[in-house]
Amino acid sequence: QVQLVGSGGGVVQPGRSLRLSCTASGFTLVTYALHWVRQPPGKGLEWVAAISYDGGKTYYADSVKGRFTISRDNSKNSFYLQMDSLRTEDTAIYYCARDLHFDILTGYPNWFDPWGQGDRVTVSS
Amino acid sequence: DIQMTQSPSSLSASIEDRVTITCRASQSIGSHLNWYQQKPGRAPRLLIYAASSLQTGVPARFSGSGSGTDFTLTINSLQPEDFATYYCQQTYSTPLTFGGGTKVAIK
């Protein structure tokens, strides 16, 4: 079964750090770009970050640039979101997702499938 | 940034109704448009990619159309399992952006 399983969510104080992980099963991640998307409580979806198939290119939303880092370890069939200097407005459910292409902005349409189950991150003092 | 505007933000419909949701991009995005369905407490599910292609396993009552700036998701003969929130997404340029969502409720 093709799926992504996320982990690492929790409650953290403002200014602290947290690392989310996402591991694939049923397929290998090595040829795909990967994404993190978040959803604040009761709100819509916000794309957070993406990484190309080999980790050579990374992309970020302005709201997290300089604070969050996306990375991948193809040998572990996993990818990560390191979240530093967390703010209360980072509180959300974080979803990992696979892109169906090796990179974004190639001129070809991209789409996300599958998605992980979601991990709740709460930033609160 | 490309803004994605969905309408309506919510609607009420009956079983077997035909439902149409629209999504407008603030600039041309070609066919770089996807549609997702999300149910409460669940991750989004891909329905339509590249504006009009039906994802494997998605019922044929779902269809997508459009290009450039104006797109439509149509659900023919609404079924009980279709009550959910629907999001459009553009992947033409970063930041990748989603519409605000359309909640489809039971009338």
Image (spheres, coloured by chain):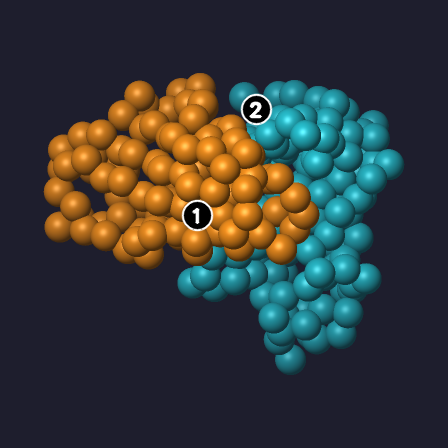
Chain colours: A cyan, B orange
Q: Pinpoint the chain carrying mark 1.
A: B
The answer to whether residue A15 shows anywhere in this view is yes
The residue under the point 60% across, 30% down is A109
Mark 1, other Cα within 10 Å: few <14 / some 14–19 / many ≥20: many
Q: Which one is closest to the eye, mark 2 or mark 1?
A: 1
Vertical arrangement, residue A72 with respect to residue A81, above or below = above
Which label belongs to residue A2?
2
Vertical arrangement, residue A42 with respect to residue B40, above or below = below
Question: Secondary structure beneath disc 2?
Answer: loop
Give the alpha-carbon distance from disc 2 to disc 1, as whole Å.
32 Å
Compared across the picture, whether B16 is left or right of A92 comes to left
The quadrant of the image that shows the C terminus of chain A is bottom right
| Amino acid type shown at disc 1 | Arg
| Amino acid type shown at disc 2 | Val
Which label belongs to residue B24?
1
Instruction: Give the farthest residue toward the right.
Output: A56
The quadrant of the image that shows the N terminus of chain A is top right
